[in-house]
Image (cartoon, coloured by chain):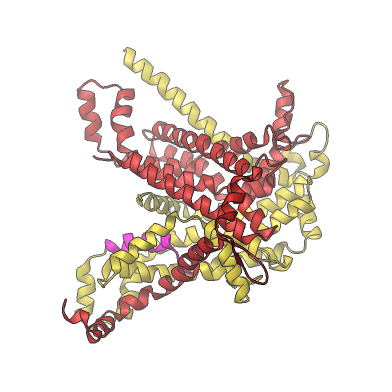
Amino acid sequence: MMEISIKKVFRAVGFSLLILWAITSLLPLCWLFISAFTPSDFMLKMPPEFNPLNFRLDNFTRLFEETDLIWPWTINTFLIAASITVFNIFFCTLAGYVFAKMEFWGRDVLFAAFLSTMMIPAQVTLIPMFLLMKKIGLYNNHAAIILPQLAGVFGVFLLRQYIKTFPGDLLDAARIDGATELQIFFKLIVPMAKPAMAVLGIFVFMGQWKSLLWPLIILQDQVKFTLEVGLATLQQQFATNYGILMAGAGFSAVPMILIFFAFQQYLTEGLTVGGSLKG
Amino acid sequence: MKTTALTLKGIGSYLIKKKWAYLFILPNILIFLAFIVYPVLYSFLLSFQEYGVWGNEWIGLDNFFYLFSDYVFWQALKNTAIVTVVMVPLGIIVALLLASFLHPLSERVKGFFRMAYYLPGVASGVVMGMIWRWLYDPNFGLFNLILEKIGVAAQPWLTSPKTALGSLMLMIFMAAPGTAIILYLSAMKKIPKELYEAAEIDGAGSIIKWFKITLPLVKATTLYLVIINTIASFQIFTQIFVMTQGGPGYSTYTLVYQIYMTAFRDFEFGLASAQAMILFAIISIFSVLQFKFLSSDVEY
């Protein structure tokens, strides 16, 4: 009897903790959208009024009036993220296939070397990369952002783990039938690896959309900025005009939120594969 | 095979035989060499030099000596250490607790909470930083409005050196550890039910079961999270850049923010490389230590 009632109390406490945490975790995002739709006259009143009845698009119209660069920034961000995603998936699948299914001299050493670099903080490579890009004339050029991300260790690992589970007989049979390695890759591996490729694609796209540091360093002209770099500069321009700032922030957050809801399952899977990489 | 591989001809024919394997990984290797191996080595060399437009000067360990006597560097190191030492364990404990409460619930309920916890992580650091700067605004921000309503004095939050770092930490704390919760949930799912049933027969209660079965069996996940979160914590930049610019004073300077300022405001690339090398060394030492320390008894 005693045990049951303690259990009940325990569960009730646990459940309220879950709810409480869900509220605090969602509150900032809700606040973002409430403020984005509340005109500044209501927001800067004393005390401010946040009433859904007052929701207007004023902040968005003013955002677009005062910064005609929002659209270029969005297009830049999309083009950079999309091209990185496409190439990264392709090259990582190629390498993942090789590490999973082919045997050759140096394979395990090479793979270990790849994995060990995951511990290297990006800031260590930042300065030499900047100097390198300046030297080869890619400073202030989107190629400087795209080029280093055409392949990546996480993707190679993810695809290798996935392709490893494919039956080897299938590949052998195809080879006996005279299929070339290219045919095997495009006709067998790629169709079967699609789920893992999708997981990688979502991670790469979202990661690139959200990145700030490298684009901030390597881009100079305002018109070439990505959305995140642009937003950071808007902050200086509109210091405390939070309505406009929140409209801009919402503009960057909505695509990510939509992707999240569309591909939630893939995201969970990708995280779990990442988690299986222990050291 | 072994003997032919030693001759040039043998190596040549081996490469031809395996050409597809090498060809397929070539793009990865090139990018790996150009954008990881070369920069790391170059950064290492740069850290012993003073960068100049007309050529660099080799100055031995001077960059490091300078840093060890630099007040701002110690401040940045201290702030980074405080954030890491407080936030990494706290975040993991919260994630473990929430995941433990979540684990026995139905899939649909679990799905809802997973969404609620992960969603804020979907927004970028810039977006979250902007929202929190607004929440923290001393005059119109939501937090001070609430405090005023309940009769507590308004706080300066990010505008005072005394509270700025704490405010940043509160923000990191309140952004629910979505990734960690998802990882813990999937680790808990893999624990065989028989283990719990056997423990119940022996008369173990929920808390004992949690300590004796759940906790040890998610240890691998804990290890992974500690390493990953420590590395991430050492690299905090975006929020600082968006919210405080390292200020007021140097109260929210972190190692990475200082690297950024040294390199791209002062153009002291040598000195900044020395800072980056110290960051690299700290992260490496931490990773190795944590791995040794926590993995010593990961056995099922």
Query: Is residue B248 placed above or below A194 in the rendered structure?
Result: above
Say whether residue A199 is magenta: no
Rendering coords of residue B195 (x, y %): 23, 33
Q: What is the display colour for chain A?
A: yellow
Query: Is residue B210 placed above or below A38 in the rendered structure?
Result: above
Give the quarter of the image for residue B227.
Answer: top left
Between B278 and A20, the residue placed more toward the observer is B278
Say whether residue A162 is magenta: yes
Which chain: red?
Answer: B
The secondary structure making up most of the magenta span is helix
Give the quarter of the image for residue B60.
Answer: bottom right
Between B76 and A26, the residue placed more toward the observer is B76
Q: Residue at x 30, y 37 (%)?
A: B217
Rendering coords of residue B64 (x, y %): 57, 52
Quadrant in which the N terminus of chain B appears? bottom left
Between A67 and B23, the residue placed more toward the observer is B23
Rendering coords of residue B173 (x, y %): 55, 36
Q: Is residue B159 left or right of residue A181?
A: right
Q: Is there any visible trace of residue B142 in the rendered image? A: yes
Q: Residue at x 76, y 43 (%)?
A: A38
Q: Is there any visible trace of residue A195 in the rendered image? A: no
Rendering coords of residue A108 (x, y %): 29, 64
- Stretch in magenta: A149-165
- Looking at the image, how many numbered discs can be counted on the residues? 0
Residue most toward the bottom? B9
Quadrant in which the C terminus of chain B appears? top left
